Image (cartoon, helix red, strand yellow):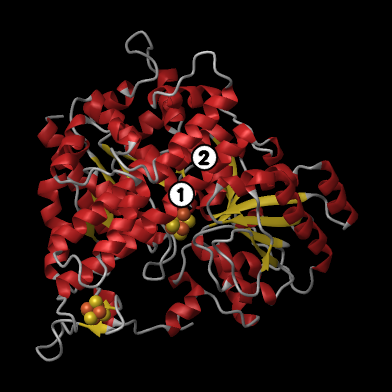
């Protein structure tokens, strides 16, 4: 590496591990990023097409010479928009397939006692059943759960009509979607349509390609992701605020360390039950360990932190470093954001990398299929593998001391409850967003921003999230966060109550009164659907559309196709969205203009790109103030 570790990450827990990795000749994401330079200019601009075997075709943009069209005649607009649309479809498919797996788990909870799953939140189940017109009178709770699960599964491939959750959006939003023909119909159908229409010789009109892609993205936010979140709450409980620890310092020298990494709570919830099994704890003690230490990584870590207080070990860029500690006895993974490089790193230590999903196997890892039909038994077999590996620890173990504390678990229900507790409930019906609307209208809170998404070597690790959050709270803007952004914020202390000291006067007062930190942890990437619902409720309460609210979205370090899908459905839901990394579209001036300008007139939301967090904060605050002016508040 050509620079000090400080210019690669702003998390001090990483520095000694980066040095350990270097000394032990372990290659990490930062080494590979450096080796990849310079990155392909055609790919960077979205101008390379591999959609058919006549290609690859590349459009030369930087000089007069060179091809301006692919062999089939596709121009830069067609090629860049097709590439983007396919990425959005892939992102939507990942979140939505996650949602489908949760629906299957709910069905198992209802019908299959062998699964070990149980419906935890009957109130939310009945409420959703009623919303979907499912009979709940004198019905057994398991039958209601089975019917809700089946109805959710039908959302993926129903032949007629639109997605059920669309009804939750404000009326004006639904009108815009209908007018633009982007109202999502069935999740699988909307994703398949992107793949079909971007096949060679199909759609060549970049605006029409984006219409199809926007519909697939809305199928994610208001479909697959929302199913994932709502059904997870029903199965595993609605998150409530509680304090937890975060960063690699949560690993323990004297216990079996099991890192659960990936996305779906179906696996992590079962692993959590298994690590508390007295026989497995006893077995761990027989191996010389004091117990079993379960910690989370990436979004599955967010899920079990939110619901059970399990420590959050680290985000996307810390997955290799966790193994470099030499103290991880097993890293158990399911789907999404799992670097294939992990198997190489694990080989250099005693760590067992255990894949569990038929959708994500990694050469060099041990595959132990996780079977939802007998979830707890599957999970126990996996945990046993970790426990038996404790005695194989060897060599140089180093666990950094760095860890911080913060509050997680701010579901919409929890936010509304917290606000209810401090406001006069006779002044407003409890369980509404009125206190939030009042705080925004009065100007005590200038607005709210969701900081979401990943890590990306193009931005100094965690700095994009942390600096943006600090600038916003300093200016009385409440921050909510999910995904790897949530890890960055909790590690930096921004989810502690003491972080009020970093806020402007208005936000500090709200935090003091409501007893909340200024940065609220709202969960995993699929839980951005919670944010959509909160915005929707706020807009309905204030009698405006989502596009009129003084709010924004930001993805300072995004990298995944899921993030592209999220950004697209957030913009199409009416929200100004700031990206810290430019998407691979800049080779098409028309498409770039469409995304950063034209969509504003159609949907109200639009993309902006700014890599400097302080500049990004300025632009976001100016957008929020502009909205306030229009609302005359
Ligand atoms: Fe080239 Fe057209 Fe085939 Fe793309 S679809 S690879 S531009 S010929
Ligand atoms: S895990 S999608 S790196 S946020 Fe959801 Fe983190 Fe981004 Fe994966």
Q: Which residue is mark 1?
A: 486
Q: Quadrant of residue 131?
A: top left
Rendered location of residue 587, percent (x, y): 18, 74
Question: Looking at the picture, how far across and down is residue 15, in whole percent?
Answer: 56, 69
| Residue holding disc 2 | 408
Left or right of 439? Residue 181 is: left
Look at 61% across and 70% down and name the residue there: 17
Q: Residue 306: x, y in percent?
A: 54, 40
- Residue 66 image point, x, y percent: 15, 90
Rendered residue at 68%/76% (across/down): 347
Q: Residue at x 69, y 56 (%)?
A: 258
**Horizontal side, residue 374 vs residue 629: left or right:** right
SS for dot 1: helix
Residue 502 in view (yes/no): no
- The answer to whether residue 202 is left or right of residue 402 is left
- Binning the other alpha carbons within 10 Å of mark 2 as few (below 14), some (14 to 19) or many (20 upward) gives many
Query: Mark 2 or mark 1, which is nearer the start of the sequence?
Result: 2
Regarding residue 526, the answer to whether it shows in the image is yes
Tell me: residue 116, above or below residue 422.
Answer: below
Say if 219 sits above or below 458 in the image: above
Q: Tags 1 and 2 in contact by the CB under 8 Å rule?
A: yes
Q: Residue furthest bottom?
A: 65
Q: Residue furthest right?
A: 286
């Amino acid at each position: 590496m050509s620079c000090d570790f400080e210019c690669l990450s702003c998390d001090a827990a990483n520095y000694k591990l980066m040095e350990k990795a270097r000394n032990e000749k372990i290659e990490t994401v930062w080494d590979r990023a450096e080796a990849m330079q310079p990155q392909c200019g055609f790919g960077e601009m979205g101008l390379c097409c591999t959609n058919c075997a006549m290609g690859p075709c590349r459009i030369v943009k930087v000089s007069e010479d060179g091809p301006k069209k692919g062999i089939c005649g596709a121009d830069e607009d067609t090629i860049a928009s097709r590439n983007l649309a396919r990425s959005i479809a892939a992102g939507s498919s990942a979140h939505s397939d996650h949602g489908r797996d949760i629906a299957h788990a709910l069905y198992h909870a209802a019908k299959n006692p062998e699964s070990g799953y149980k419906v935890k939140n009957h109130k939310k189940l009945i409420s959703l059943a009623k919303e979907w017109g499912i009979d709940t009178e004198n019905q057994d709770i398991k039958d209601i759960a089975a019917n809700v699960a089946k109805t959710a599964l039908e959302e993926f491939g129903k032949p007629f009509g639109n997605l059920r959750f669309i009804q939750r959006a404000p009326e004006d939003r639904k009108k815009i979607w209908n007018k633009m023909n982007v109202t999502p119909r069935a999740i699988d159908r909307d994703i398949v349509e992107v793949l079909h229409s971007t096949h060679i010789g199909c759609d060549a009109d970049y605006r029409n390609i984006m219409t199809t892609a926007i519909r697939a993205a809305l199928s994610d936010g208001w479909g697959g992701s929302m199913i994932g979140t709502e059904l997870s709450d029903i199965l595993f409980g609605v998150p409530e605020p509680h304090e937890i620890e975060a960063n690699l310092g949560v690993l323990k020298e004297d216990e079996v360390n099991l890192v659960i990494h990936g996305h779906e709570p179906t696996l992590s919830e079962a692993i959590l039950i298994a690590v508390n099994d007295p026989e497995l704890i006893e077995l761990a003690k027989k191996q010389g360990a004091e117990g079993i230490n379960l910690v989370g990584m990436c979004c599955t870590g967010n899920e079990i932190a939110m619901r059970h207080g399990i420590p959050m070990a680290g985000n996307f860029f810390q997955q290799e470093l966790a193994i470099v500690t030499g103290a991880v006895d097993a890293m158990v993974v399911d789907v999404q954001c799992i670097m294939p490089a992990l198997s190489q790193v694990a080989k250099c230590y005693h760590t067992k990398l255990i894949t569990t999903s038929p959708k994500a196997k990694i050469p060099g890892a041990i595959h132990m299929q996780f079977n939802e039909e007998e979830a707890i038994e599957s999970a126990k077999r996996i945990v046993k593998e970790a426990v038996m590996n404790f005695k194989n620890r060897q060599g140089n173990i180093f666990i950094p001391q760095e860890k911080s504390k913060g509050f997680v678990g701010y579901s919409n229900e929890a936010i509304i409850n917290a606000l209810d507790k401090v406001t006069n409930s006779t002044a407003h019906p409890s369980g509404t967003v009125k206190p939030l609307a009042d705080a925004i209208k009065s100007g005590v809170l200038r607005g709210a921003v969701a900081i979401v998404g990943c890590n990306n070597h193009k931005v100094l690790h965690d700095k994009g999230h942390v600096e943006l959050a600090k600038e916003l709270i300093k200016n009385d803007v409440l921050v909510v966060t999910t995904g790897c952004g949530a890890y960055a914020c909790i590690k930096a202390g921004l989810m502690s109550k003491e972080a009020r000291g970093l806020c402007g006067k208005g936000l500090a007062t709200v935090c003091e009164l409501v007893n909340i930190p200024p940065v609220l942890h709202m969960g995993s990437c699929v839980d951005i659907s919670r944010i959509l619902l909160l915005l929707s409720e706020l807009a309905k309460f204030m009698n405006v559309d989502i596009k009129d609210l003084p709010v924004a979205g930001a993805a300072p370090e995004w990298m995944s196709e899921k993030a592209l899908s999220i950004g697209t459905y957030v913009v199409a839901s009416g929200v100004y969205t700031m990206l810290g990394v430019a998407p691979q579209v800049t080779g098409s001036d028309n498409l770039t203009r469409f995304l950063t300008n034209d969509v504003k007139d159609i949907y109200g939301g639009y993309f902006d790109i700014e890599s400097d967090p302080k500049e990004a904060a300025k632009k976001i605050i100016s957008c929020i103030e502009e909205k306030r002016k229009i609302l005359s508040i």
